[in-house]
Image (cartoon, rainbow, N blue to C red):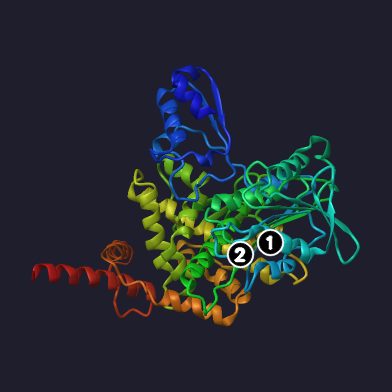
Amino acid sequence: TFRFAVDKFGIEAFDDRLIAVDEFHHVSANPDNKLGAHLGALVARDKVHLVAMTGSYFRGDAEAVLSPEDEARFDTVTYTYYEQLNGYKYLKTLDIGYFFYSGSYADDILKVLDPTEKTILHIPNVNSRESTKDKHREVEHIIDALGDWQGTDAATGFQLVKTPEGRVLRIADLVDDEPAKRDKVSAALKDPAQKNNRDHVDIIIALGMAKEGFDWIWCEHALTVGYRASLTEIVQIIGRATRDAEGKTRARFTNLIAEPDAAAEAVTEAVNDTLKAIAASLLMEQVLAPRFNFTPKTVKSGPVEGFDYGEGGYDPAKENVGFNEASGQFQIEIKGLVEPKSKEAKRICQEDLNEVITAFVQDKTTIERGLFDEELVPEELTQVRMGKIVGARFPELDAEDQEAVRQHAVAALNLTQKAKEIALSNRDDTETTGNTALIDGVRKFAMDVRELDIDLIDRINPFGEAYSILAKTMSEESLRQVQAVISAKKVQLSPDEARDLAKRAVKFKQERGRLPSITSPDPWEKKMAEGVAYLARMKQEAANG
């Protein structure tokens, strides 16, 4: 409606107005995006006040939402999942799980679908690998697995299913294509008189509906079958389960994905889905993490007001970790950390690290190597790949500011991963990990390593924990198959990578007074030396014609 109004009346008609755009991730800096072009014109004209709102400020297609110069004109207000849950009266914990299955998902659905939980189940897109291509049969199969069908409720159109325990489930089927039936069900779900009635519906089965903006406060479990192409869509689906409601203390998101079948020809596609699922889970943990404020440790460092530094308080001789209970923010000192200088770089480090991390975990080469390359030196990912991603995403920043953004992003991702590892190892099997466990994990990791420095953070492979989860949930045969597909296309050194390594070697020389050695026992030093040698060989070959 807004786009058509601009087309008809021109942007001048909106002068001196407040324009608020919800679900702002639909905007794109791509010139083909009509809404993006209109907003760009409004910003350029500078006669309106714009409010942009979204649950996920990144797009599934990895396009920028706004151009950097337009984005710089906005003041950013970030409200994290952590702050959201912290401010709720009832809901305090959100769990995320990725599960792999073999055979038909409908056969395995009850392993993850608990009929006692209020659930939104998104069945797979008909074009996806997980789909049987007959969505109606899939719904029938799920209903059959839950119990005996008792007919349809005349008033709402909900399916009534009696479980083996004798409870009658009320199931809303939004997959049915028959307009009269689907409209009746949809109207019953939107009935304002039933908004606060927990017993109105138990399970909603959907395909393309019930994602953005769909409000069912009682939803405890968002269960999605098949990998969704867009990380934004996953964030939106998770949002369905994160509404506060009386008696609802925890919610969860589960993604059920087809395990690669060693016999299937489509194994490359299956591997691709697996990698994307891992990327999504890494990103989700980061989205759920409390906010990190990283500062360099110097002789002038001191405690920040409002932050709790643990039992002994602030120690001037060590790297300290403070936590602010009210805001859910960590203040973490790191030795050797580069501080952002420009206003834009500071803003990115405070507000947009998730965008950088999204681009990093969506980079297929990064995930493949992080998970399956046994010879990988973590610095190749944390320094070279992340460095390239930051450079491509923020070309307007100078080299020092790009390095500051890279270091902050790597620190945030690695601290989240390490915290999750500790949280999982400390919990009982009966208890699911929650937001407080993640906070305890960050504290424990930061306290356990005596000196938190950037070298240490660069040396952690952020995909290490993801691999152990993969190993637990997939069969040995399919895991070997994934490894084989990725090993078959092992990454050789490219001229670009060699140049990046050589740049790091120059930095190494400035710090150590010598060039990296190709015979060094340190794998990262050796890798940098290989980059220098590769460039030297290329120059020699060019000189020889």
In space, the residues marked 1 and 2 are separated at their CA atoms by 9 Å
Answer left or right for 394 relative to 532. Answer: right
Q: Secondary structure at mark 1?
A: helix
Other-residue count near label 2 (Cα within 10 Å), few / some / many at <14 / 14–19 / ≥20: some
Q: What amino acid is found at the position of numbered circle 2 in the picture? A: Thr
Q: Secondary structure at mark 2?
A: loop
Upstream in the sequence, badge 1 or badge 2? 2
Residue at (64, 58) in percent of width and height: 135
Residue 204 to residue 466: above or below: above
On the question of residue 111 being in view, the answer is: yes
Answer left or right for 215 relative to 44. Answer: right
The residue that disc 2 covers is 132
Given contact means CB atoms under 8 Å apart, are the residues at marks 1 and 2 in contact?
yes
State the image coordinates of residue 440 (x, y, percent, origin top left).
68, 61
The residue that disc 1 covers is 137
Residue 433 to residue 188: above or below: below
Answer left or right for 481 relative to 542. Answer: right
Decide which of 72, 331 is in the foreground and name it.
72
State the image coordinates of residue 213 (x, y, percent, origin top left).
65, 41
